[in-house]
Amino acid sequence: MSWKRLLLLTVAIGCVSVQQSHSQAEPIPVNAAAADFAQLGRYQASNTTLLQHANSATVVFLGDSIIDYWGTKAGIWFPHATWINRGIGGQTTSQLLLRERADALSLRPKAIVIEGASNDMRLGFSNEQIRDNIVSMAELAHAHHISVFIAGMAPVCDCFRDLTGLRTVDRIHKLNLLLEQACHQGHWTYLDFNSPLEDSSGHMRKELTTDGVHPNAAGYVLLAQVVNHALRHIK
């Protein structure tokens, strides 16, 4: 075998080896966080079904676990069939913003309830970053002629284990003030998810929570009162 043919054979073997190594090191993720950061797949089938029927969604609740667990892990969801839950536990407002179009705007509701912030604050995002993401969601909904309702961040406590961390009373209150101001400027409605659940120190009341972050059945009753009053004309 000539040295030229030997050289070409060596290069070809090397290329195949590199390709195999590359494919083994970087497998294509299937419906994983790396492929679906916003978890759009969670409600895709349900959204498709809803879109087949007119006026199937009058209110969409877009949020994190506070919304996700409502009626599934604690409390009772609203009796209106067209009030749609689009909560996903653990999500930040960046993820909510990414899936707002698919999980809320596309359903053409009359109103949207935007709830989020706890995971952002836990992970160290600033109040201003959180506010800006929520305002972006509100502006998109407003542009689609959807009434906007923004929920304040609920209190947190270390009632059962340490969960407060960066989610201090002061930071939560300052964020909620920013959200109230944004609602005033945008002519949206602010939903107070904090005051009904907090104790005299500003922390979550132990008797209203399952773990220090999420409301229990009694806690969700109080939040439902806030929502029902604000959305009393939307069924």
Image (cartoon, grey):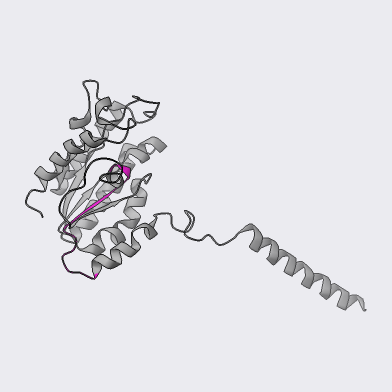
* Residue 111 rendering spot, x and y as whole percentages: 16, 55
Q: Residue at x 39, y 54 (%)?
A: 38
Residue 203 seen: no
Farthest residue, direction top = 200
On-image quarter of the N terminus: bottom right
Q: Nearer the viewer, residue 89 or 18?
A: 89
Q: Residue at x 32, y 53 (%)?
A: 97
* Residue 6 rendering spot, x and y as whole percentages: 88, 74
| Residue 147 against residue 3 in the figure, above or below | above
Count of marks overlaid on the render = 0
* Residue 114 rendering spot, x and y as whole percentages: 24, 48
Q: Residue at x 31, y 32 (%)?
A: 210
Residue 59's image quarter?
Answer: bottom left
Farthest residue, direction right = 1
| Residue 19 against residue 233 in the figure, above or below | below
Residue 198's image quarter?
Answer: top left
Q: Nearer the viewer, residue 94 or 163?
A: 163
The stretch of residues the image draws in magenta is: 52-66
| Residue 127 against residue 81 in the figure, above or below | above
Can residue 89 be found in the magenta stretch?
no
Residue 89's image quarter?
Answer: top left
* Residue 187 rendering spot, x and y as whole percentages: 12, 48
Instruction: Locate residue 233 relative to residue 141 in the image: left or right.
Output: left
Residue 86 seen: yes
On-image quarter of the C terminus: bottom left
